[in-house]
Image (cartoon, helix red, strand yellow):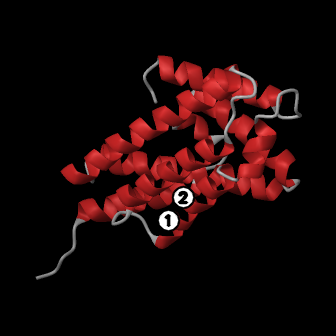
Amino acid sequence: MDAFSSKDMALKAQKKILSSMATRSSVQMFIDDTTSEILDELYHVSKQYSGNKSEAQKVIKNLIKIAVKIGVLFRNNRFSTEELVVAQDFKKKLHQGAMTAISFYEVDFTFDKAVMSELLSSCRDLLLKLVNTHLTPKSHNRINHVFNHYSDPQLLTQLYEPGGPFRPNLTNICRGLNKLVEDGTI
């Protein structure tokens, strides 16, 4: 018997189209203004930290592609009951990470790069577990690229340096995270 499914084919087409549309202008259709502002700040931090505009763009583009693909999978009810438990664990860990990031920002000299790096690595591992059977190895590499980039202890240390060059970016990131937490988005 032929295992063709038009629903599966439509889902693949959606993921493919959306991944190719993950440009700055089209992001507005899929990502709210607050998240977009956070992504802009993350881009500026990455660009200034790495000194490489194309690398900074690639990290953000990968982040957007992954977010859009997971959104498509979720809206199409592709996750099993067990995977939805992993998704809830991911959301809790992401919330914990946001609260920790905000706390480290609000109270100078409390930043602990090991704690922040571990939170981001845990988020990465949960996300990889969630999408393990749904996304290609290329998408798994995108997830690793994004989380490995932002969990870099040196980047985090510079980001949280009181009076450092990234302080205005961190202020805007934490302001956005606060709004997303208050809204219940994360």
Residue 159, how many percent across, how many down? 77, 38
Q: Which mark is residue 17?
A: none
* Callout 1 secondary element: helix
8 left or right of 95 in image: left
Which residue is disc 2 drawn over? 143
24 left or right of 184 in image: right
Amino acid beneath label 2: Ile
Labels 2 & 1 near each other (Cβ < 8 A): yes
The quarter of the displayed image where residue 112 is located: top right
From this view, report whether residue 184 is shown above or below residue 148: above
- Residue drawn at (49%, 57%) of the image: 17
* Callout 2 secondary element: helix
Residue 44 in view (yes/no): no
From this view, report whether residue 13 is shown above or below residue 159: below
Where's the N terminus, which quadrant?
A: bottom left
Query: 2 or 52: nearer the eye?
Result: 52
Which residue is disc 1 drawn over? 140
Residue 138, how many percent across, how many down? 53, 70
- Residue drawn at (16%, 80%) of the image: 2
| Residue furthest bottom as drawn | 1
Amino acid beneath label 1: His
> Is the residue marked by circle 2 packed among few (<14), some (14-19), or many (20+) residues within 10 Å?
many
Residue 30, how many percent across, how many down? 51, 38
- Residue drawn at (44%, 69%) of the image: 136
Separation of marks 2 and 1 at Cα, in angstroms:
5 Å
